[in-house]
Amino acid sequence: MLQTDSGFDVCGAESHDSVVPVLSDIVSEPIVLNLLSPNWGTWDGLLNLTQNSNSLVAAFSSADLYKYLYYTYTGPVNLNGATLTVVLSFDRAAAASSKKVAFFNTLGDSWCFVNDGLDDDDIGLDMTYSCSDFTHAAAQGQTFKIGLVFAASAGSVTIKSATLQLAQ
């Protein structure tokens, strides 16, 4: 893992010399951005969020009208063909209320819906979800959000990993 001068964590890069200012122009290795890195950006949303060094916990309550969390980034970046992958672990209360998850981004109308139908044996296990329906680019200075929407009304979900792999 390489960290650039601007704070990006980049997998697949061997030195600062191999990272150019516009990440989407790199074509030799896939660029994978660790969205849980505190050096890369911030998570926010209308949920009770707790972030530690290697995970993010979102707690749900029935009072939450909108149950989403999002990651804010400022371009330039080309999301066309990018893949957002998250590893989630639902506790029993969240899994009992709803396991529905949707990915979103604010650059376009791309949504990925997940209705995993976890059974009791899956509660607390790491479940991997991906979305590759992103089709837009953010210009220099353009701010956008990518994130997750949940339908759960109780319990919590732990986001154990969140990566954005840019297309080559």
Image (cartoon, rainbow, N blue to C red):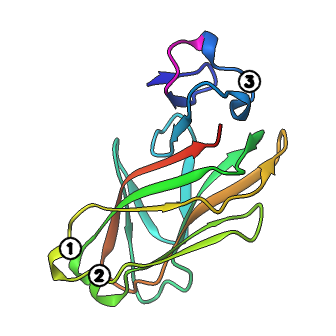
Q: Position of residue 46 (x, y in %)?
A: 54, 72
Q: Earlier in the sequence, mark 1 or mark 3?
A: 3
Q: Earlier in the sequence, mark 2 or mark 1?
A: 2
User: Label 1 belongs to which residue?
Assistant: 122
The answer to whether 19 is drawn above or below residue 103 in the figure is above
Q: Residue at x 84, y 43 (%)?
A: 139
Q: Nearer the viewer, residue 86 or 55?
A: 86
Quadrant holding the N terminus:
top left
Q: Mark 3 and 2 residues: CB-CB less than 8 Å, in contact?
A: no
The answer to whether 92 is drawn above or below residue 89 in the figure is below
Q: Earlier in the sequence, mark 3 or mark 2?
A: 3
- Chief secondary structure of the magenta portion: loop
Determine whether the residue tagged by mark 1 lies in a helix, strand or loop.
helix
Query: For this view, does 61 lie left or right of residue 64?
Result: left
- Distance, label 3 to label 2, CA atoms, is 42 Å
Magenta region, residue range? 12-16
Determine whether the residue tagged by mark 2 lies in a helix, strand or loop.
helix
Determine whether the residue tagged by mark 3 lies in a helix, strand or loop.
loop
Mark 3 crowd level (few <14, some 14–19, many ≥20, 10 Å Cα)? few
Name which residue type carries label 3. Answer: Pro
Farthest residue, direction left: 121
Q: Mark 2 and 1 residues: CB-CB less than 8 Å, in contact?
A: yes
Which quadrant of the figure has residue 128? bottom left
Query: For this view, does 33 lie left or right of residue 55?
Result: right
User: Label 2 belongs to which residue?
Assistant: 95
Name which residue type carries label 1. Answer: Asp
User: Label 3 belongs to which residue?
Assistant: 21
Q: Position of residue 157 (x, y in %)?
A: 34, 69
Mark nearest the camera among 2 and 1 is 1
Query: For this view, does 5 lie left or right of residue 142?
Result: left
The answer to whether 17 is drawn above or below residue 66 in the figure is above
Q: Residue at x 61, y 24 (%)?
A: 28
